Amino acid sequence: MVTTSGAGRSCFTYVVIGLGGLGSAAAYWLSRRVGGEVLGLEQFEFGHVRGESQDHSRIIRKTYHTVPYVRYAIEAYETWAELEADAGEQVVVKTGELNFWPSRTTLVEEDYSRSMATCGVLFERLDNVELARRFPQFRFGDDVHAVYQPDGGLVGATKANGLHRRLAQRNGATLLDNMPVTRIRRSGGDYEIVAGGRTFTARHIVVAAGPWTNGVLAHFGLHLPLTITQEQVTYIRSADLEEFRPERFPVWIWMIMDNYYGFPVYGAEAVKVAKDRFFVTNPDARSFEPDRENEEEVCRFVANHIPRAVGPILYTKTCLLTHTPDVDFVIDRIPGHRDCVCAVGATHAFKFASVIGKTLSQLLLDRHTPYNIEPFQLSRPSLAGGAKTIWQLP
């Protein structure tokens, strides 16, 4: 068990349940203002690979299909910069971002362009000729064009998670791992939390449990319509890795549902490429074995469209994603429990992790947030039909 100086305490003001990407950020932002009044509980060991957020890199971008997302993405960049200034370390690497738009797609390009333009985000459209001139690593036919956004890049995910936790501890927070929560109940004006065989009390709770969200929310009598899938990324050791360093090769996305996407060399001496597959699984009983068909599809895409990246597979790594029905986040108070908040990343939240953590801290400390989180509320129609109260917390 990893502990801090407050490990023997049992009474705190704020408890964060789950210390992956979002929970670690919430613990950090709370600790900046209330220091040692924060307790973080992680059911596994810190830095485990069973969940969603532990890998070398995650894409960060301002290319989103709605104005609220674009504006929140802009805030995310600013919040990451605050973390970097506090830590004296870099976690965001701007490489530029390419969105490839095939002639047939399940997405609406105009939604992205209009939203970015409304928010003053600079971008440019590249035809096949200009794309080949500026980014010769890619090879596409005349039926594909690209949109380039220079602020896109990657967040060092594993590094960022570690920084959030380390700085939270520096600020006085107590973080404990291998502490699965087995009971939450009201106790007077506080909450009693049993985790890892110990009992804690707190006035406020943050639920940031990723694929295990419903297991925690059950203690509040709430169940959300969430789907958990197993995904994977493949690291390919190109014969010419210098062509794919961050200063020469951008992050990129093939803009169609079940898309391909990829990264420059970062964290491992290989190019990282993935294809969404949405394979439904149980987070407690899933396989860590890579799907070979998915791996082969990735390699074919690379051979056809990024031929200079072709090489032996360094490794393929699995992870989980938590889906809401509309693929929008959950960032809200838990119904009937004004002192408790919940966040669900809905498959694409890591780029927002620090600002989501800051938002959760504001909801508890200030009772409001300046960010527009209305699209992420639990009362929205897509969740209202599936979210149901199964019993009230005693």
Image (cartoon, helix red, strand yellow):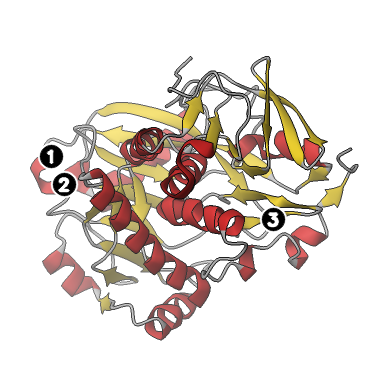
User: Which residue type carries mark 3?
Assistant: Arg
343 or 63, nearer to the observer: 343
Q: Mark 2 points at which residue?
A: 244
Q: Residues within 10 Å of mark 3 (few under 14, many from 20)?
A: many
Q: Residue at x 75, y 49 (%)?
A: 225
Placement of 112 over or under 2, stated as above or below: below
Would you say residue 304 is visible in this rendering? no
Q: Quadrant of residue 121?
A: bottom left
Placement of 38 over or under 133, stated as above or below: above
Q: If you read the primary sequence from the N terminus, does the residue marked by circle 1 or circle 3 appear first?
A: 1
Q: Residue at x 18, y 53 (%)?
A: 249
Q: In which quarter of the image is residue 54?
A: top left
213 or 333, nearer to the observer: 333
Q: Name the residue under label 1.
A: 241
Q: How crowded is mark 2: few (under 14 residues within 10 Å), some or many (20 or more)?
A: many
Q: Name the residue under label 3.
A: 333
Q: Residue at x 26, y 34 (%)?
A: 236
Q: Do the residues labelled 1 and 3 touch (CB within 8 Å)?
A: no
